[in-house]
Amino acid sequence: MKASRSGFTLIEVTIAMVVVSVVGLTVAGVAMALSTAHDNSRDYYQCIQTGRVTMLRLQDMLRRARLVTDVSDTGLVIWESDANGDETINLPELTLVSWDESTQRVIRRCVKVPDDWPVPIEDLAVLLSAATFESWSASESTFASLIEEVVLAENIEAFSVQTTPAAPLAKSVSVQMTIGLGDHSLTVHDGASLRADWTDRVENVEGIYTLLP
């Protein structure tokens, strides 16, 4: 009487190993695809959130602003409020929002005077014609230690600003920016109207804009 066969033949073992390998590779491929999809979804969601939060911050500043005093292709100077009620633009009341291409950041800059500062510059008046990017550069060198920087957004690949009409008579501002993260980029466009603008007090005298009292 023949003994019953036990174990597996070499062919059976080989086939089993091939099947296990194929299943393993398939599972690994699916896991990798799911992981990539998750990363892509996360990056895209982050782009959307960055755009939304940045636009909300800009809209809040613009809606409360008195004037947009100057605009460039990549930024704007805002007279945010008449903080001391003197109906005059003062240096600490100005805010510069600009895009830094090298760091891909949108940055808000303003002069922040500490309570114990020995020199009173809170009421340092600025002519409307001087509330420009060029004048701000001079102010930055003079008051470098008082400049406060706040990063409004990072990973910004492009940033542009347009006003209607041109500053300092602008009553509305539109902003377009492209957010990049990983292999993804998203372009968002939005705008805001100045609800408390003082454009009716702006007068052009021989090509120079002046703020009327």
Image (cartoon, rainbow, N blue to C red):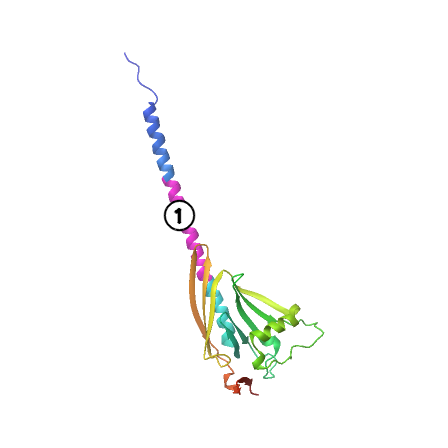
Which quadrant, please, contains the N terminus?
top left
State left or right for residue 95 relative to residue 45.
right
- Tell me if residue 86 is in the magenta stretch: no
- Mark 1, residues whose alpha carbon is within 10 Å: few (<14), some, or many (≥20)? few
State left or right for residue 142 relative to residue 168.
right
Q: Residue furthest right?
A: 118
Q: Quadrant of residue 144?
A: bottom right
**Res 38 visible:** yes
Q: Which residue is mark 1?
A: 34
Tell me the residue at 35%/26% (across/down): 13
Q: Residue furthest top?
A: 1
Q: Please, what is the three-letter code of the amino acid marked with disc 1? A: Leu
In the displayed structure, 133 sits above or below 42; it is below
Please report the bounds of the magenta region as a residue range.
Answer: 26-49
Magenta residues, dominant SS class: helix
Tell me the residue at 32%/26% (across/down): 12
Could you tell me residue 117's position as x and y percent? 70, 72
Could you tell me residue 174's position as x and y percent? 45, 73
Tell me the residue at 47%/69% (across/down): 160
Could you tell me residue 173's position as x and y percent? 46, 75
Could you tell me residue 150's position as x and y percent? 57, 66
- Tell me if residue 35 is in the magenta stretch: yes
State left or right for residue 168 relative to residue 114.
left
Q: Residue furthest front?
A: 206
Give the SS element for disc 1.
helix
Along the line of sight, which residue is nearer the eye, 26 or 5? Answer: 26
Along the line of sight, which residue is nearer the eye, 103 or 172? Answer: 103
Which quadrant, please, contains the C terminus?
bottom right
